[in-house]
Image (tube, helix red, strand yellow):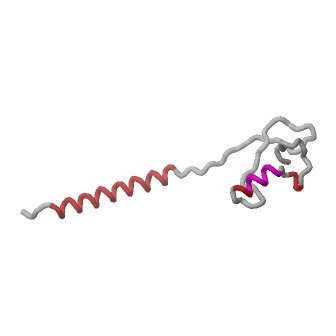
Amino acid sequence: MCLPCACGENSHPGNVSPYHLAMAKALGWGDVSPFYIDLEAPVPESGVPKPGPLTVHLKDDHLQYAITWFALAGALVIAFGVWLRRRRPAA
């Protein structure tokens, strides 16, 4: 089921609004938009599609990113120390 289109019809080929297809083609996505729409509520009179609770499953890579950036910062401190030591005149 698609969103109702501006023309008020819901009988387009594949039940997809020509406006959605035009938008997808204009953006270079081809004949299909790379997104979908979840229905949580209200229940349509026909009962189709059956709404359900929306759940979000996001990747949690915060620890990996923190370790990476702190390791890069540590490497930069070491490289700066080596550079600073080589710049000092020998006594």
Where residue 22 sits, quadrant-wise, is bottom right
Furthest-left residue in view? 91
> 9 or 66: nearer the eye?
9
- Asked if residue 19 lies in the magenta stretch, the reply is yes
Q: Residue at x 71, y 56 (%)?
A: 26
Q: Report the number of numbered marks.
A: 0
Q: Is residue 89 left or right of residue 55?
A: left
**Quadrant position of residue 24:** bottom right
Estimate the x, y position of residue 41 in percent, counting from the top left: 80, 36
Examine the rendered structure and indicate whether residue 13 appears above or below residue 54.
below
The residue depicted at 23 percent of the width and 62 percent of the height is 83
Residue 41 is left or right of residue 11, and the answer is: left
* Residue 89 rendering spot, x and y as whole percentages: 10, 62
Q: Residue at x 70, y 59 (%)?
A: 28
**Residue interval drawn in magenta:** 18-24
Magenta segment includes 73:
no
User: What kind of secondary structure does the magenta stretch mostly adopt?
Assistant: helix
- Return the x and y of residue 52 as percentages of the image width and height: 80, 42
From the top left corner, tell me how far across and down residue 64 is, in percent.
49, 54
Quadrant (top left, top right, bottom left, bottom right) of the C terminus = bottom left
Q: Residue at x 29, y 56 (%)?
A: 77
